[in-house]
Amino acid sequence: MPSAPRNTVGGPRVHTRPPQAVEVGPLLPPRATANGTLRKLHEAALIGFAERGYHGVSTRDLAAATGVRPSSVYAHVKAKEDILLELTLLGHEEHNERLRKALLAAGADPQDQISAVVREHVAVHATYPLLTRVCNRELHALSPANAERVMAVRDDSTQLLVDVIAHGVEMGVFHCADVWLAAAAIGAMGIRVAEWFEPGGPIAVEEISERYAEFARKMLA
């Protein structure tokens, strides 16, 4: 059972450790197209990897959670790592696409751009906490070739945020000594949302996303 949440003054409930999978809302975004047994394997792996880490989940564990024999798992995937690759690509591509759409809709004003990008960054982590935890924690378990595929998407998202901040600095709207470090700090605070935010709790995803956008604007003022 999860530890009892503690309440922050005027804010969301924060867990002393991350809530269990049954408490976190949707597992995968609509872009996930796998169905049948493969879908069950992806969802079982996501829950297991998020709660116990990639190396803490065996193929036998996945088979048991999915209701198939261990040998049947290999009828759907060549190796357990293939599932991790699918999940981490899925999460990073969802994140990247949402950031890009938000930026395109924001217009040319740097304040609007950083607000839109940070809102989406936080919203993805708050809406899909298990998926984003796996994306941010388990990349080390991928082979170099597979990790490179995922990091290409991740680096593109990072560069998008860097470019938004750099644009604001060039226009004299933002002020920071190091653009990359500013992007890293803003990105990191959004990533942490997946570790404590409780979907369905007293604060909505939209509200927490807007608060973080405000934090980012103040950091760059």
Image (cartoon, grey):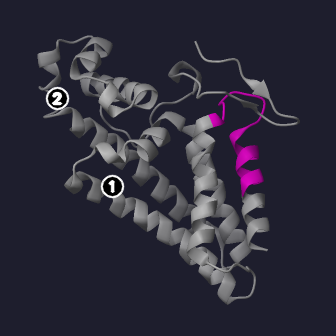
Label 1 residue SS? helix
Viewer can see residue 29: no
**What is the magenta range?**
196-212
Q: Are marks 2 and 1 in contact (CB under 8 Å)?
A: no
Q: For the residue marked with disc 1, what is the amino acid?
A: Val
Label 2 residue SS? loop
Q: Is residue 178 magenta?
A: no
Q: For this view, does 20 lie left or right of residue 144?
A: right
Dot label at residue 110: none
Crowding near pointer 1: few (<14 within 10 Å), some, many (20+)? Answer: many
Q: Looking at the picture, tell me which residue is in the foreground, 212 or 207.
A: 212
Name the spot of residue 123 as percent of width and height, x first: 62, 47
Q: Quadrant of the C terminus?
A: bottom right
List the residue tagged with mark 2: 76
Q: Earlier in the sequence, mark 2 or mark 1?
A: 2
Q: For the residue marked with disc 2, what is the amino acid?
A: His
Q: For this view, does 21 lie left or right of residue 207?
A: left
Give the number of marks: 2
Q: Quadrant of the N terminus?
A: top right
Q: Residue at x 75, y 67 (%)?
A: 219
List the residue tagged with mark 1: 150
Q: Looking at the picture, tell me which residue is in the foreground, 51 or 106.
A: 51
Q: Is residue 209 magenta?
A: yes
Q: Residue at x 34, y 63 (%)?
A: 152
Name the spot of residue 211 as percent of width and height, x first: 77, 52
Name the spot of residue 166 as percent of width and height, x first: 60, 81
Q: Looking at the picture, tell me which residue is in the foreground, 64 or 210.
A: 64
Closer to viewer: mark 2 or mark 1:
1
- Above or below, comparing residue 6 to residue 63 in the picture: below
- Looking at this view, name the residue that lies furthest to the right: 10
